[in-house]
Structure formats: structure tokens, C-alpha cells
């Protein structure tokens, strides 16, 4: 707080001894010690209050930064969710298109087999009719 050296204290003590006198000097020294102690406690209390306020401000700043980061992460999560959802929809459309193509191919193969059996049955009928004629 104050920068007093040894010689400053000696000068103050000599002046106090001359002004106050030797009989009242011990009481005055005790009272000055009490005031100095109270002043130091007050200064330390104010200093700790200021430090707590500064720490509270720092914590508020950290909280605000973290809130901003949380909001940014929520935005990223939302965008990712939208991208994944659109990917699922696109995949769903592709799967449906493939299923339709498979159904069409299966229908075409089934139709082709039916026509092949009908032609084979007609040939057998035609061949047996010729053998009946002979």
C-alpha cells in the first residue's frame, strides 16, 4: 500500500514521542495498530470483492461464448439432419425406382414365359394334328 522504509518509521516515532509524550505513546501505538489492522482488512475485503466481480464477469463471458458455440452446434446439427433426411429421401426414391424396374422386368419375364408356353402348346397341337392326319 504505502512504501515506508525503516528510517521513515524512526522519524515518525521520534516526532510522535515528542508530540504525544512518553506516557501516552503506548496507547497511541496500540490505537494506530488497530487502525492499520482495520484499514488492511478493509483493503483486503475490497480487493477480494473486486476480484470476485472480475471472476464473475469472466465467467459470464465464458458462458456467453459457450452459449454462442452451443447455438452454432445446434445449427450445424440441424443442417446435418436436413442433409441426412434429404439423403434418405433420395435413397428412398432410388430404391422405389429400382423396385419398379425389377417389377417391370419380372412382369416382362413372366409374360415372355407365358407366350413361350402358348406357342409351345400350339406347336404340340399342330404336330399331333399332323401325325393324326398321316
Image (spheres, grey):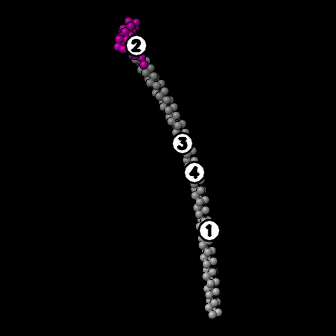
Residue positioned 38% across, 7% down in the render: 15
Q: Secondary structure at mark 1?
A: helix
The earlier-in-sequence mark between 4 and 2 is: 2
Residue 38 in sight from this viewpoint: no
Q: Mark 4 and mark 2: span between their CA atoms?
A: 81 Å
Q: Tell me if residue 80 is in the magenta stretch.
A: no
Q: Where is mark 4, residue-wise?
A: 83
* The residue positioned farthest toward the front in the image shown: 134
Identify the mark at residue 28; answer none if there is no mark: 2
The crowding category of the residue bearing disc 3, from other C-alpha atoms within 10 Å (few below 14, some 14 to 19, many at least 20), is few
Q: Mark 2 and mark 3: span between their CA atoms?
A: 62 Å
Q: Where is mark 1, residue-wise?
A: 104
Q: Secondary structure at mark 2?
A: helix
Q: Where is mark 3, residue-wise?
A: 70
Q: Where's residue 63, x and y in %?
A: 52, 37
In the image, the segment drawn in magenta is 1-21
Q: Is residue 114 above or below residue 18?
A: below
Q: Secondary structure at mark 4?
A: helix
Q: Which of 119 and 74 lies nearest the eye of the viewer?
A: 119
Query: In terms of image quadrants, where is residue 114?
Result: bottom right
Mark closer to the observer (2, 3): 3
The reply to whether dot 4 and dot 2 touch (C-beta < 8 Å) is no
The earlier-in-sequence mark between 4 and 1 is: 4
Which quadrant would the C terminus be assigned to in this image?
bottom right
- For this view, does 36 lie left or right of residue 104? left
Amino acid at each position: 500500500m504505502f512504501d515506508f522504509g525503516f528510517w521513515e518509521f524512526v522519524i515518525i516515532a521520534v516526532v510522535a514521542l515528542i508530540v504525544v509524550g512518553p506516557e501516552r505513546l503506548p496507547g497511541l501505538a496500540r490505537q494506530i495498530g488497530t487502525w492499520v489492522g482495520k484499514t488492511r482488512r478493509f483493503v483486503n475485503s475490497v480487493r477480494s470483492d473486486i476480484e470476485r466481480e472480475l471472476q464473475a464477469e469472466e465467467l459470464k463471458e465464458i458462458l456467453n461464448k459457450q452459449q454462442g458455440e452451443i447455438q452454432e452446434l445446434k445449427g450445424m446439427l440441424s443442417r446435418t439432419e436436413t442433409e441426412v433426411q434429404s439423403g434418405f429421401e433420395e435413397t428412398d426414391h432410388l430404391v422405389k425406382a429400382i423396385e419398379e424396374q425389377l417389377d417391370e422386368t419380372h412382369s416382362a419375364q413372366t409374360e415372355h414365359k407365358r407366350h413361350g408356353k402358348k406357342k409351345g402348346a400350339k406347336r404340340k397341337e399342330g404336330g399331333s394334328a399332323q401325325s393324326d392326319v398321316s
